[in-house]
Image (spheres, rainbow, N blue to C red):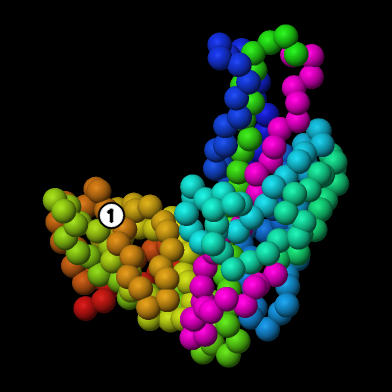
Amino acid sequence: MSYVKSVRFSVGLMLASLVCSQAMAGVVITGTRLVYPASQKEITIKLNNNGLKPALVQAWVDTGDVQSSPTSSKAPFVLSPPVSRIDPSKGQSLRLMFTGAPLPVNKESVFWFNILEIPPKAEGLVEMNVLQMAFRSRIKIFYRPDGLPGLPGDAPPQLQWKVIANGTGFALQAFNPTVYHVSLVELALVVGTQRYEADGGMVGPGESTVFALPALKSQAGTAAQVEFNAINDYGALVPTKQSLKP
């Protein structure tokens, strides 16, 4: 989310940056994820200012470090323009270009697109100490090489699940045998009439990810099922149910 919050502050004007959901933003990104086909020279990213005031927006790409900045990021992408002024109810298109740095050709790679909305100068508060906050939004970029086997939408049902010991408790472990990333939300293990919730996340190609089940106190039987919503290329939720791996 991106908005300006002004309050009395004892040490003068400060600027804080917080990573927030774009659902509450003044400037929002069209879509919840970006797919960059390797065969394309560039893709277009659309921003819209749904706020009531002009906004100055800085954009950059990072490799997954939430603490990154436009000057510290090493992601192999160039954005044009990197800084934009967007008037209320107006939009701005950004061009995202891959620099050609070496990336795996046999699986997807993931990066993050960032926008930082810089608040305008607070009006009528010249004599006051003011705290202004700038909020940052991030969404995933999936760099997709040409000729990958299968389809991205076929990847979620291919996840292989099992319950494992995790410290003093238990967790779900997902292995992704495909070449695509799988993003999932509303993850749960269902054992009979009991439902054990876990935080969602992402499972990379050929990787395993562990999701803690804090409420589960004993090993689940093979009759248990894993339920989750997979997020497709268009940001839609796809309900999925799977049995545990024997």
Q: Decide if residue 25 is in sight here.
A: no
Range shown magenta: 97-125
Q: Is residue 221 above or below residue 88?
A: below
Counting labels gives 1
Q: Does residue 119 belong to the magenta stretch?
A: yes
Q: Does residue 2 belong to the magenta stretch?
A: no
Alpha-carbon neighbours of circle 1 within 10 Å: few (<14), some, or many (≥20)?
Answer: many
For the N terminus, the image quarter is top right
Inspect the image, locate mark 1, and give the three-letter code of the amino acid beneath it.
Ala
Q: Decide if residue 200 is in sight here.
A: yes
Classify residue 95 by image quadrant: bottom right
For the C terminus, the image quarter is bottom left
Expressed as whole percent of the image width and height from the top left, the position of residue 178 reads: 43, 81
In this view of the protein, which residue sits in the foreground, 3 or 70?
A: 70
Q: Residue at 78% of width from left, 48% of height from top?
A: 84
Q: Is residue 126 left or right of residue 240?
A: right
Expressed as whole percent of the image width and height from the top left, the position of residue 77 reads: 63, 66
In this view of the protein, which residue sits in the foreground, 75 or 136?
A: 75
Q: Is residue 56 above or below residue 230?
A: above
Q: Is residue 20 left or right of residue 90?
A: left
Which residue is farthest top?
Answer: 127
Q: Secondary structure at mark 1?
A: strand
Q: Residue at 52% of width from left, 68% of height from top?
A: 110
Q: Is residue 167 left or right of residue 85?
A: left
Classify residue 133 by image quadrant: top right
Q: Residue at 57% of width from left, 49% of height from top?
A: 69
Expressed as whole percent of the image width and height from the top left, the position of residue 85 reads: 81, 44
Q: Residue at 39% of width from left, 63% of height from top?
A: 227
Q: Is residue 53 above or below residue 150?
A: above
Q: Is residue 168 above or below residue 230?
A: above
Expressed as whole percent of the image width and height from the top left, the position of residue 196 reads: 30, 53
Q: Which residue is mark 1?
A: 212
